[in-house]
Image (cartoon, rainbow, N blue to C red):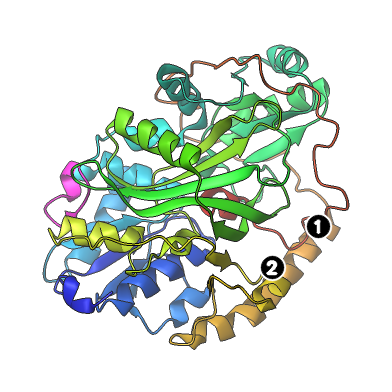
Amino acid sequence: MPASLFDTRVPAVLLRIDRNPFHHGTLGAVRSLGRAGIDVHVVADTAESPVSRSRFVRQIHPPPPPGASAHDISVALHRVAAHIPRPAVLIPMDDASALAVGRLREELAPSYLLPALPATLSERVADKAALAGVCADLDVPHPETHVPDSPRQAAADAGRLGLPVVAKWSRPWLLPPGSGLRSTVVVRSAREARELFLRSAEAGSRLLLQGFLPPGPHRDWFFHGYADRAGGMRGGGPGLKLRSWPRGAGLTAVGRWTPNPQVQALSERLTAALGYRGILDLDFRRCGTTGRYHLLDFNPRPGAQFRLFADAAGLDVVRALHLDLTHRPLPPGVPVPGREFVVENYAPLTALRPSPAGRELAWHAADDPSPGRALWPLWGRHVSRRLRNRLAGPPDRTDAPRPTQPIHPAHPAHPTHSSHEPTHPTHPTEPNEPTDVAGPTDDEKASSC
């Protein structure tokens, strides 16, 4: 895409609050905008991240700390804006950032260009308990969901759903680091459900129990897009998750742009009904019994693999956002079905195989080689730390700090019910699944789908 299409006088500011050093989506946004001639400022902790090595980074700014108040985030962003001569396009790269920016939109508007998104909508779709209610209201397929209010109720709900069940924390971005809590786990007994509920205060949000949809070939899908000022969907499409890490439940390690009219139509109907504006990343799983696509997650920000959907004109969701907010025309793009995206530290062998329709790697790029070279020594140290921590055993939770955030979500959940869910899957995970020794941290899984 020619740089002349962009208003290169308008910089971009990428905001990420979580401390994940291997968030490849941030690097993707840096490269996509930087290649278009746009100055890219990064507000994130990149001290041990390959992102800091990219030649397309104009400047790195210190982020607000994890758990920062809205005031602290506002101060940090206004500090950055003071060093930029004109309003910049602001792009949140993780859930915590997206929710904060949504709440602060009016306050940030003089300094930043942002989509016209209602202040509470990002929170409504990102909170997994509230999302169940959204799906029920809009008749969007969603796994049967219960939000227990006691340990006894958690055990009873697990039994009613049919074991195994999926347990999720409604606001995974609030999980305290070092707690050992995961954003999503498979629970195989009523006792496990009860014990997990007892950690609700530590987790900082409500526990959800959902009917389990078994993974399988051609069942995990995602949809990325940018809803422009008029509500049109641009710069994305449906993708098939070929490999994930951890297997069957984690971030996309290998994805392929694959036409899917059902996923496309469902995504467009959902966002139109909500009046959503901006970048979105949706996750679906197809039920092997009914063939219906169930919405699992709605992320109000770019997904880490968004560069999969760079079309024949070079348009992706972050470029679409910048063009639209600077009132530039968006070129008509031609999809590139079959194109692949590979995160090479999770799928190194796949990265070496040929891809007839083209492939983009998360870290390695010929025009920006330094992040790829920096990845492997940093990744090696990361894996070594994970191994040492695992061998040391689970953390002692006797003095675990209590969160200051309210446990209940801003919007009450309305559980959905479906008589078509498989209630007794026989294989919760794929056979011969590797252990999650070098897998993503909780922050990675919460922000890198």
Frontmost of labels 2 and 1 is 2
Cα separation, mark 2 vs mark 1, equals: 22 Å
Tell me the kind of residue under disc 1: Arg
Is residue 114 part of the magenta span, yes or no?
yes
State the image coordinates of residue 62 (x, y, percent, origin top left): 37, 67
Q: Is residue 69 visible?
A: no
Number of residues whose C-alpha sits closer than 10 Å to that of mark 1, classed few (under 14), some (14–19) or many (20 or more): few
State the image coordinates of residue 287 (x, y, percent, origin top left): 66, 31
Number of residues whose C-alpha sits closer than 10 Å to that of mark 2, classed few (under 14), some (14–19) or many (20 or more): some
Residue bearing the label numbered 2: 347
- Residue at 27% in and 42% down: 277
Instruction: Determine the secondary structure under disc 2.
Output: loop
Tell me the kind of residue under disc 2: Ala
State the image coordinates of residue 149 (x, y, percent, origin top left): 61, 14
Identify the image quadrant of residue 52.
Answer: bottom left
Locate the N terminus by quadrant: bottom left
Residue bearing the label numbered 1: 390
Instruction: Determine the secondary structure under disc 1.
Output: helix
Magenta part of the protein: which range? 106-116
